[in-house]
Structures are given as C-alpha cells and as structure tokens.
Amino acid sequence: MIRKVLIANRGEVASRIIRACKELGIKTAVIYPEVDSTALYIKKADEAHLLEGDPVASFLDPEVIVHIAVSCGADAVHPGYGFISEKAEFAELCRKKGLIFVGPNPETLRLLGDKQRSKAIAKKLGVPVIPGSEGPVQSAEEAEAVAAEVGYPVLIKASYGGGGRGIRKVESPEDLASELASASSQAEKFFGSGEVFIEKFIERPHHVEVQIITDSHGNIRHLFERDCSLQRKNQKLVEIAPSLILDEPTRQEMAEAAMGIARYTGYVNAGTVEFLVDSSGKYYFMEVNPRLQVEHPVTESITGIDIVKEQLRIASGERISFEQRDVSIYGNAIEFRVNAEDPKRNFAPSSGRITAYYSPGGTGVRIDGAVYKDYIVPPHFDSLIAKLTVWARTWKDAVMRARRALEEFVIKGVKTTIPFHLALASTEAFERGEFYVGYIEEHPELLDYHYDEDPYHRVIAIAAAIAAYEGF
C-alpha cells in the first residue's frame, strides 16, 4: 500500500482525498499558495508545503509539484481533478522520479486527451458516435463542408478540451468562419493546442456518463451512470444518479460500451466515459474523462463504494475490491455544486469573507466542503466551494430532501448558487425529472427567486442602532 500521498490540488477535493487516505492509514501532504494559508485542507493534512509565486501557476507546474513530492518523501501523487490532472507530461514526470501517479499512465492520457482519437476508437468498437468531422478541421472551407453535410446547428469543439470549455454552438453558415477562429484561439489559450473539430448539435439531449474502475490485473467494473444534464454554458451545476431516462437494456448496453473502450485502451484506475442521449433514447459516445469526477459522490451514494479508496488501492497494485455482481443501484442521489457566484449577475464569481456558515445534516445528507465562518474565498480559482449531495430511496423523496437541505444551508458574506438550486429543485419540472442539456438557458425564470440577501447583517445593524440610541 502507498505510505504517503502528495495531493496536487486544493479545496474540497483535497479534503475529500485526505479522508480516504486517513481511512486507509496513508499519510498526506498538501501544497498551498499564500492565499490558501487558512484553508481547511491544510488543517486536515499531515503536512503542508507552501507554493511560491502566482497562486494558479503554481498548481500548473509539474516540476514544482514533483520536486515537493520527492523532497517530502511521498511515494505517490493524487492529482484530483482540474489543474493538470489529465496532463500526460505530469504523469510521466511522476513515473520518471519514481512516484506513483494515482490515475492512468501517460500513454493512456495522451491517447484519451485527443477527443478525435477517442472517437475513432469508439467507432471502431461499434459504439455510436455523434456525426461530424473525422479529425481536426484544417480550414474554414473544410468546416463549412462538414457542417453542410451533418446539418446546422453544429458544435465547434477543442480537440484537447475539457471541463466544458472550448465549445461553441453555430446556428448558421454565416457565423461559422468567425466562430471557428474564436474557438481555435480559445483552445490554444486554455489547452495549448488550437485544434478543433465539428460535431452535429443534438437538440435537448441528456448528458449521461458511466463510471468505470479498472485495475492492472485486467479487471474492469462499472458503477452505473450519472445524469449531468443540468448545466450552464457547458458547466455542470447539478448531477443525479442513476439516470431517470434509461431503460435497463440501454443502461447495460452503455455500461458494456464504456468497459469495452476502457479495455481496448488499457485504461487503469477510475475514469468516466461520457455519452449524449437524444430524445429517442439513442446514445452517442462523446469522450473519456481520465480522472476523478467532481460528481463522484452521487455514484458513491447509490452504490456504497468509495471511489477514491479504490483509486489508491489500484495505484498500489491491488485488485479491485469488489465483483461486478456485488454492485447494484440503491435509491437516488442528487449533487448540487455550491459555487461562490451570483446567479442574478450572470453567475459572476463572488469572493470575500464568509460571515456565516451553517451546513445541513440529517439522514442522507453529505457535504463536501472547503469553507467555514471567517474563511476568505480567494478570487484566483474555480468558484466551487462546496457540494451538497442528498440520497433517498426514491426520486421524489430525494427531491424533498434536497429542498429541505438547501433551505438549511446558509453561507453568507459571498453570493452562492444555493438560492438558485433551491428555486430549481422547487419546480414541478425538476420533481418530474423533466430536464435536459440547455434547460437552464431556456428557463430564465429560474433566476426570479426572492432571497433575503443577508438577514444576519441586518440584525447586527439594527442592534447597533438600538445600542447607539440607548447610549450603550
């Protein structure tokens, strides 16, 4: 078993990995920039190492991270998600320095990092793929020809994209050339490559992903699927497990397709195979996310399997700890991403001091959090500050539990997505499970919620005024 892990991440995911390590008796080391000096994950780890320089750039430098891992005596690195978790160069440097990378090997990361190569593999294995270009488009003329063949609207997607970035929808031929240039420029900026490709846009699909776990002994398992359709500009906001739209034959077929892709690519560790499902129930392969997913708690909730602990065991050379026959779906789970954002201002990031924090509890309620009262949310990073996951035996019960938990969840001092989630979960459409990719953009009335912005500050102000009036 791994003895000590350096966690090359921050916030709630760092705390999540620390919990799994503690249950396995593994020591933990974390890295942090000065702006994170009061962060929870630092307090929970066995040791913490300061990153010099720019807060974000420090998390993106494999040389710096690996140097700290070697210096502190770690024998493994867990990348979490985001930052450089999918960079083959990072995994390769870890291997070169004798460190275990908790994730796929560099060769697999390179293969799956190219979305077009992944799509070609799926096609070769007989898995349906979304119609589009066979590879990166080399010119506006080629893009126009592909778009004309598959029909508008189309999506322009970065070949090496991820996290919802690098995607543009084009409605008509007049906009294609300019959007192509903009997409390529953005792809170069975010992913280091300006390669883009064209796909047919599928109206009102569901985004369904299958969780897979594989080991170095040839064992492959799936943990069923998650529905991640509730998104804003390709950024996931709410995830559920299992999907409400799949029948059992389709569920099993998609799971087999996902495991087939993993087997063909020699995938080892935890990962996710992502699909789009259209209104008729037909599914199409999209990509493989070769890492832990933000939304993994909903899968853990319905299966009882700790995915991070499996990652660590597999990285240590062990076999998967369960058989496929041992995995079944029990109940329904919903995860709400609590972002430090103001939904009423186009989800603008909100940073500052947390003036009040009260988390919900009770049966079937899980919090993966990164903040507390008086913590200062820095403006430098992704806005995710907590995740609320609820579980219940039925979908209706899960929705009712979600409403109750969201009402209990109080974070003051910065704007958050909590009131938006409560408004969404309170709709009849959500209760019926009637949502899809694009649903939030099509329902701007969700932003018409009424919310007492900061009653605690108002109480303090009134008390201070009374005290002043009375002469205290």
Image (tube, rainbow, N blue to C red):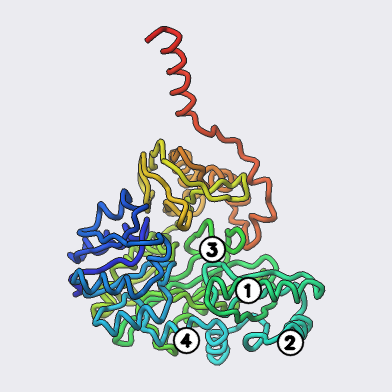
Mark pair 3, 2: CA separation: 32 Å
Q: Is residue 339 above or below residue 64?
A: above
Graded by Cα atoms within 10 Å as few (under 14), some (14 to 19) or many (20 or more), the crowding at tag 1 reads some
Q: Amino acid at mark 4?
A: Leu
Taking depth in this image into account, of 159 and 188 the one nearest to the observer is 188
Mark pair 1, 4: CA separation: 23 Å
Instruction: Give the number of the mark in front: 1 or 3.
Output: 1
Q: Amino acid at mark 1?
A: Ser
- What is the tally of numbered marks visible in this picture? 4
- Tell me the residue that label 4 is attached to: 111
Q: Is residue 34 above or below residue 162?
A: above
Q: Amino acid at mark 2?
A: Glu
Instruction: Give the number of the mark in front: 1 or 2.
Output: 1
**Can the viewer see residue 390?**
no
- Tell me the residue that label 1 is attached to: 185
For the point 20% across and 66% down, the residue is: 24
- Provide residue 115's location: percent of width, then percent of height: 55, 81
Outermost residue toward the front? Answer: 53
The tag on residue 228 is 3
Element on which disc 3 rests = strand
**Quarter occupied by the C terminus:** top left
Mark pair 1, 2: CA separation: 18 Å
Element on which disc 4 rests = helix
Instruction: Give the number of the mark in front: 3 or 2.
Output: 2
